[in-house]
Image: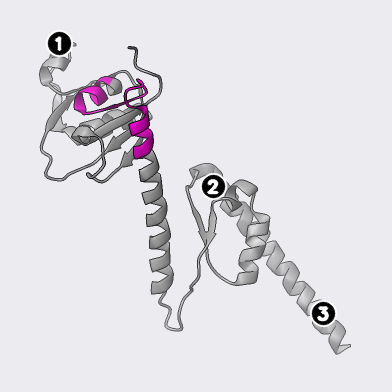
Amino acid sequence: MEGVSQRRNHQRAENSWADNARSEADAVARLADSHHPRLVLAAGDVRAIQMLRDAVPAQVRDIMVVIEGGRTVDGSSDDLADEVVRQVSSAVAEDTVAVLHQLRGHLGQGQAGEGADAVFDALRQSQVELLVVHDDPDDDRRAWFGPETGQVALSSQELDDLGIDQPHSARLIDVALLGALETGASVRVVPHGGGPAGDLGALLRWPTAG
């Protein structure tokens, strides 16, 4: 009887773990649907993690990375935190390289632009799909913006010519970010080395004529 009881207890534990895994998988899937993450990190008991991987949808499983580590006796988790930082940094670096490669490939084909003149022209037309920017805190270039979407310019005169009274001034990079966010564009911050000319570039929603 003892063996039967142990098997029942083991089965109940397995069922409980499976239920927990399905519940956690549903929560992870909902978050993934809402936020569209680049990476999902998981850590914990090997068996629990395997059940979680089996229960999540395939599109989540494809971006899930299991990391080693856990909390120590005193409650600290430095190793786990370091690995999380490493994984996230690696993913960001890979994506940044891919974006810069895509930007370079599209320049000259009318599907991308770089430099303040080209990028601000595209921002005014809501043409920017992805703004690529290096934000140097010592960059004190100025730009101007008005109260409506797409009213961004490199000089106040440009907005004056559009009948916009008293346009506001801010750092050029900040105005570019404002123009991107107002028009639903994504933003990728990149390092200066290998970045776009003038620290500003853009992948476009539609090709520029000519």
Residue 74 sits inside the magenta stretch: no
**Residue receiving disc 2:** 32
Residue 193 occupies which quadrant of the picture?
top left
Residue 109 sits inside the magenta stretch: yes
Give the number of marks.
3
Pick whichever of labels 1 and 2 is earlier in the sequence.
2
**Residue receiving disc 3:** 7
Q: For mark 2, give the secondary structure.
A: helix
Of the pair 110 and 62, the residue shown nearer to us: 110
Residue 77 occupies which quadrant of the picture?
bottom left
Magenta span covers which residues?
Answer: 100-121
Residue 164 spot, x, y in % from top left: 17, 15
Residue 195 position (above or below residue 89): above
Residue 139 spot, x, y in % from top left: 13, 40
The residue at the point 57 percent across, 53 percent down is 28
Of the pair 196 and 204, the residue shown nearer to us: 196
Pick whichever of labels 3 and 1 is earlier in the sequence.
3
Q: For mark 1, give the secondary structure.
A: helix
191 vs 126, left or right, is: left
Q: Amino acid at mark 3?
A: Arg
Q: Amino acid at mark 1?
A: Asp
**Residue receiving disc 1:** 161
